Amino acid sequence: MKFTISIEIARPRERVIQLLSDPEHRPKWLRGLVLHETVHGEDGQVGTESRVVFQSGRQSMECTETITRREPTNLHDITSDQVIHFGREIVATGMWSAAHEHLTESGPETTHWVSENEYRFTGLLRVVAPFMRGAFIKQTRQHMQDFKAYAEDGQDVRDAAE
């Protein structure tokens, strides 16, 4: 299963990159995040593996995230015409996914975020996943909209859950 979602964020690209890459901000916009701990490597760097746990209602999901791309590696002093690339793979029971994020400056105060996603399944999930395509797209869109609300207005998803 593959899909692409994009969103405009009314913040300079440098600020968007800072918020996306700083682990302190993740719980504020990544709905359901319980734990994101580095197991091997340095957070955000290519090759880094992390243990990630999400909670949704009574359902919990644990996975391993591996950073596969970060270009340029130095995110300081980037030019306005450079495209920033982040890539990650996530492995959980019965599922593998890859996300390729592209951040471009669409104006001095605006960032265009494109997220290309691919999912592969095994076992029972392979049978039911095609019927859940809409749910995967909806969840990805929700994460991106939550990030936008946090970046633009400081809205913390944890406040909405209370």
Image: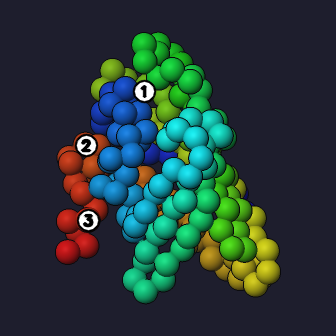
Distance Cα–Cα, label 3 vs label 2:
16 Å
Reading the chain from its start, which is encountered first: label 3 or label 2?
2
Q: Amino acid at mark 2?
A: Glu
Residue 152 disc label: 2
Q: Position of residue 8 (x, y in %)?
A: 40, 40
Q: Quadrant of the C terminus?
A: bottom left
Q: Position of residue 99 (x, y in %)?
A: 62, 49
Q: Secondary structure at mark 2?
A: helix
Residue 80 visible in the snapshot:
no
The local crowd at label 1, few if under 14, some if 14 to 19, many if 20 or more residues have their Cα within 10 Å, is some
Q: Amino acid at mark 1?
A: Ser
Rendered view: 159 above or below 37: below
Which residue is disc 1 drawn over? 106
On the picture, is 126 further left or further right than 45? right
Q: Amino acid at mark 3?
A: Arg
Q: Secondary structure at mark 1?
A: strand
Q: Position of residue 89 (x, y in %)?
A: 66, 52
Distance Cα–Cα, label 1 vs label 3:
29 Å
Residue 158 disc label: 3
Given contact means CB atoms under 8 Å apart, are the residues at marks 1 and 2 in contact? no
What residue is at 50 percent from the left and 33 percent from the top? 103
On the picture, is 137 further left or further right than 56? right
On the picture, is 116 further left or further right than 6? right
Nearest the eye: 66 or 142: 66
Q: Nearer the viewer, mark 1 or mark 2?
A: 2
The local crowd at label 3, few if under 14, some if 14 to 19, many if 20 or more residues have their Cα within 10 Å, is some
Rendered view: 138 above or below 83: below
What residue is at 43 percent from the left and 77 percent from the top? 56
